Amino acid sequence: MSDYYEYILVPSPFEPWNEILTAYLADIGFESFVDEEPVLKAYIPEELRNEELINQLLFTTLHNKGLTNLKVSSNSIEQQNWNAVWESQFEPVFVNEQLLIKAPFHTNIDFNGMIVEIEPKMSFGTGHHQTTFLMCEEMMAMKLKDLAILDMGAGTGVLSILAEKIGASYVEAVEIESWSAENCAENAIRNNCTKVVSLFGDFDVVTNNQFDVILANINKNVLKSHLSFYATKLKNKGELLLSGFFTTDNDELILAAKEVGLMFVKSKNKDNWSMLKFIKN
């Protein structure tokens, strides 16, 4: 596994620039983020770090969009320190008193609802980010019993695990990072899941022919490039849940989805982050 670079960013004002920075940095390879107002910490694998591209984004692109007061520093963070970073930030997450997402080191929590236990390691998806929260919230309101589910960009596997706990009969969890696919598989075992299949790769590794529900919490550009694939993999009347983008991206994604036969059903938002739901016509 590679070392990571930690970027420490201090935008002024902190909000909404912390959210805007997160979205733009995710598009160029940053994988994890920690909000510690007034500081945003962002993490990128060393092999994906392009200093020229990062500087252009921070000091030209976003400067032209109005971010004129930004302090930036960076340092290499060794692999063995990564879990300590997660554990120091990872608090239990409650989703509407129906679901608890916790780590193994969270003990003695009195909770009567559904529990998903996640060892995050380096993977995205602990429930803390608004997009994961939105996806979990919507899934808890759906009837997934005996359905086939595809989870694209599975990260820690939290959505795949939740899908099985709700009643899904088969879940394919696809991750483009090998260490993340391993983390997903480990977390599935941790939660006694037997129907979650963790796959390393992109949409080319998807094995099942068609799915009742597709979950995709990635970023806008990847989602747009995958929409036609999602449409072909969904059963008639199948449902697609998308997140990983801002509410300002809704119209663009709704239009792109319509062009491939996916009808917009509903949207939810949390702190300007969005979740869109579609059905295949």
Image (cartoon, rainbow, N blue to C red):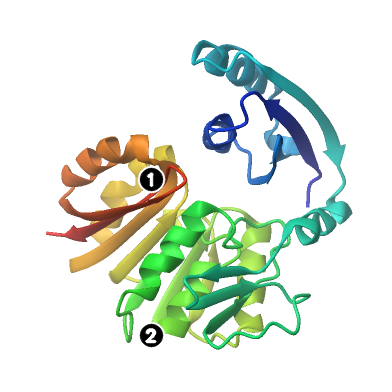
Q: Label 1 belongs to which residue? A: 223
Dot 2 lies on which element?
loop
Q: Quadrant of residue 127?
A: bottom right
Three-letter residue code for mark 1: Leu
Mark 2 Cα-neighbour bin, 10 Å: few <14, some 14–19, many ≥20: some
Question: x and y percent of residue 95 in the render?
Answer: 50, 69
Instruction: Kindly identify which numbered label has been placed on residue 75.
Output: none
Q: Specify whether 109 is left or right of 280.
A: right
Question: x and y percent of residue 136 in the render?
Answer: 45, 67
Viewer-proximal residue among 212 and 19: 19
Question: x and y percent of residue 199 in the render?
Answer: 53, 66
- Residue 187 drawn above or below residue 175: below
Whether residue 78 is visible, yes or no, is yes
Viewer-proximal residue among 189 and 125: 125
Dot 1 lies on which element?
helix
Question: x and y percent of residue 22 in the render?
Answer: 57, 37
At x 47% / y 49%, what residue is drawn? 218
Mark 1 Cα-neighbour bin, 10 Å: few <14, some 14–19, many ≥20: many
Q: Check the image and name the residue furthest to the left.
A: 281
Q: Specify whether 139 is left or right of 197.
A: left
- Residue 29 drawn above or below residue 125: above
Quarter holding the C terminus is bottom left
At x 57% / y 18%, what residue is drawn? 67
Label 2 and label 1: CA atoms lie apart by 25 Å
Q: Label 2 belongs to which residue? A: 169
Question: In the rendered structure, which disc, 2 or 1, sits on the residue that comes first in sequence?
Answer: 2
Viewer-proximal residue among 227 and 14: 14
Q: Specify whether 130 is left or right of 108.
A: left
Whether residue 235 is visible, yes or no, is no
At x 45% / y 71%, what residue is drawn? 172
